[in-house]
Amino acid sequence: GWLVTVPSQSPENMFVGGTDPVSLCVASTSDIALIRDLLTHCIEAARLLNVDSDRSEKWRQIMNQLPPYQVGRHGQLQEWLEDYQEHEPGHRHFSHLIPLYPGDEFTLEETPELTRAARVSLERRLAADGGHSGWSRAWTVCLWARLREASEANHHLVHLLTDFATGSLLSLHPPKIFQIDGNLGGTAALIEMVLQSYKGIIRVLPAVPADWRGRFSGLRAAGGFVIDVEWGEGQMNSAQVRSTLGGPCRIACPNPAGAALRKDGKPIKSQRTGDLLEFETAPGEAYQLSW
């Protein structure tokens, strides 16, 4: 009763089967993740633009018939529809972890069991010497950043710079082949450590090691927000949120009750629920935040 993709692959990994390792399968997890990500955004775009109501219903039907994500014998997120044995446990790709990054379907708050299974998959692959190229190491940093594991993200960021880059920071794929993916992925990884924005929530310094200090300005967050932050030793000193579109802004902070929110030096109203601080913004206005 499931809708599946045939033929399918989990790029570029293989599993044990027949007389040789096999790559072709039915409905790899990466296929299902990409379809779910695409249709989710199509449905949301149709809602926002008030178009394609009939298509949206069809897309929902398709999503309801897709195979569910499954947890395998090791507690890992299954890479394939069946719990196959990997031919190369330390494979450099993390294709089945797309729902964690770059997708946003798996989160610590909303899908704890699947996020835990994705973490087990990541840990098992790294334990078998995975992540052994520049772009793959960058993806590893992004995955740990989404799990908000600052020390792990920093560990692999250091390896990306010291093991897979030239003196001028051009990223390398073994043996020593320039590969722009590592540079672009490394930039994305660094940003993911200092600012995340998905599921309608902005997270400042979500995976920053305690001994880092610095500042960034002009980073964009979903919803038309521009963020500037200065911090030291893992703690935010000050932040500014500029709104280009207006509307509500939701920021996760460790101590919402102790957060100070101002506009033009004057306190403004906000709602505080759990670790979230929410306030209304106006187009073109800037808001100062500290905690």
Image: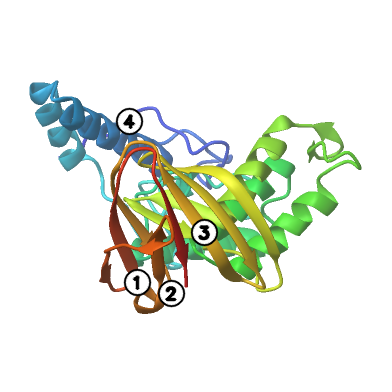
Q: Nearer the viewer, mark 3 or mark 1?
A: 3
Give the side of residue 15 with respect to residue 78, left or right: right
Element carrying mark 1? loop
Type of amino acid under label 4: Thr
Q: Are marks 1 and 2 in contact (CB under 8 Å)?
A: yes
Give neighbour class at mark 3: few <14, some 14-19, many 20+ (Cα, 10 Å).
many
x then y, percent, for residue 107: 37, 59
Mark 2 lies on residue: 254
Mark 3 lies on residue: 239
Mark 1 lies on residue: 275
Disc assigned to residue 100: none
Element carrying mark 2? loop
CA gap between label 1 and label 4 equals: 40 Å
CA gap between label 1 and label 2 equals: 6 Å
Judge by depth and name the residue closer to the eye, 238 or 74.
238
Element carrying mark 3? strand
Mark 4 lies on residue: 5
CA gap between label 3 and label 1 equals: 17 Å
Q: Residue at x 27, y 64 (%)?
A: 270
